[in-house]
Image (tube, rainbow, N blue to C red):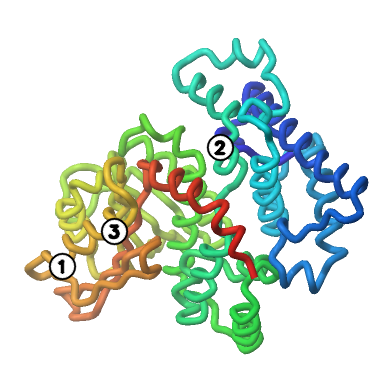
Amino acid sequence: MIKIELVDYDNLTSLGIQITQYVNSNLRDIVQVLKDTLEIDPDFGLDSFFPRDYLKRKPQECRDAVDELYEIIYSTTIRDFIKPKYEYLLYSILCWWEDCADSEADLIPNEIDDKLKMDLDNEEERNILKWIQDFEEYYDICFQDHDFLPSQLSNLVMLFLRSPKLLEMIFQYDNLDDYIDLMECDLRDRYLEIRYEQKSKIPSSLSEKIVVELVSAIRRFQKRVAHFENRDEVQITADLQDAVEGVLNSKYGLLVSREFTMGRAIKKLGETDLYIYKEQDGIVTEYAVLENKYIENFTNQYNQLMGYLNPNFSFGITLSLNRKMSLKQGFDEIENKLREVQGNFKPVNVQRLVGNDTTIIVSEHIVPETGSRMKVYHLIFQLNDKERRKAATLARKSSLLLKN
């Protein structure tokens, strides 16, 4: 079975298993119809289910992928992830199924059983009940993201071609390699050329690796945004600490604390912030402070962070919780506020890393005590996901119809 973006698999319950089984049963029956059609009708092809170039180069692999996807969904083992080629195929199958259906009533193959209806009894769970019976929601809840769609993937590849180092901040190269067969022909050729030249690339700095882990955690949170709608700054900071402290410690020997007083702040960081450091043989090496606030309070957030960051730190991080604006508006707000800052900590450089789909803004300021530059990474946890759902719905058919 595949994961459903309505279920918290880190704290899986019997209800979560029931939801996963129900959605996968519908996917299984839909894919079964495609399998039967391919076996019965020799003239039925897979042109609508894969990029033209991929199907032409690897026709048998594409055909096998249909059976493999069915086996993945039919399996009782819940997969942590599935490869992009299976995501692309599943998304294409959903589009095909919607076009084939005579009515909306035919889109969901299976009735939901009474036990599951009874178990989904509070307000949030009633929303889940509605979503798993709404076929349009399947374009969102069955996928971790939509990076496999042509437009999104082309943007990622173009970013890589222009600045591989920037892309590494938000997307691991090994993951992008998994999308090679789905890339547009010319972009794939250029991508492979650069990847070949990068066999001996220098590893990222530790600061960049820390930010990558934080971005990855936030992206995982984003997939379960409904679970965070009613959580406040302190709770989300605690969630973030739980999500990253293990991996930062195991990979880099770092510690993450929410119980620390420093700088000119009177309050403890434990109320809203994270302190990232290393302690070895009694010697403490300070790396970063993360300050977390609602995006409306960004200027105060930035100034408070500057009060914490002494010259011993490597960098700072702001995490802005955005419940009211679109993601683009949120990053516009942060960039505008940064450019309005005056005084000793006025940014001398402000840079967006990913254009309109910005994932990070990086600012640099002069450290008064040393005259050196220090970076601050500005992240957003997008709790307003209306734009994502709307964009995914509008894009699904047009994106797949405009393949190579």
* Residue hosting label 3: 331
Locate residue 185, reporting x and y percent: 65, 78
Name, please, the residue furthest toward the bottom: 197
Label 3: state its secondary structure: helix
* Residue hosting label 2: 136
Residue in front for this viewpoint, 283 or 13: 13
The residue located at (62%, 41%) in the rendering is: 142
Q: Which of marks 3 and 2 is nearer the N terminus?
A: 2
Label 1 neighbourhood size at 10 Å, few (<14), some (14-19), many (20+)?
Answer: some
The residue located at (65%, 66%) in the rendering is: 179
Locate residue 88, reporting x and y percent: 67, 55
Would you say 334 lies left or right of 129 here?
left
Q: Nearer the viewer, mark 3 or mark 2?
A: 2
Label 2: state its secondary structure: helix
Are the residues at dot 1 and dot 3 in contact (C-beta closer than 8 Å)? Answer: no
Amino acid at the residue labelled 3: Phe
* Residue hosting label 1: 339
> Which quadrant does the N terminus fall into?
top right
Would you say 327 lies left or right of 63 here?
left
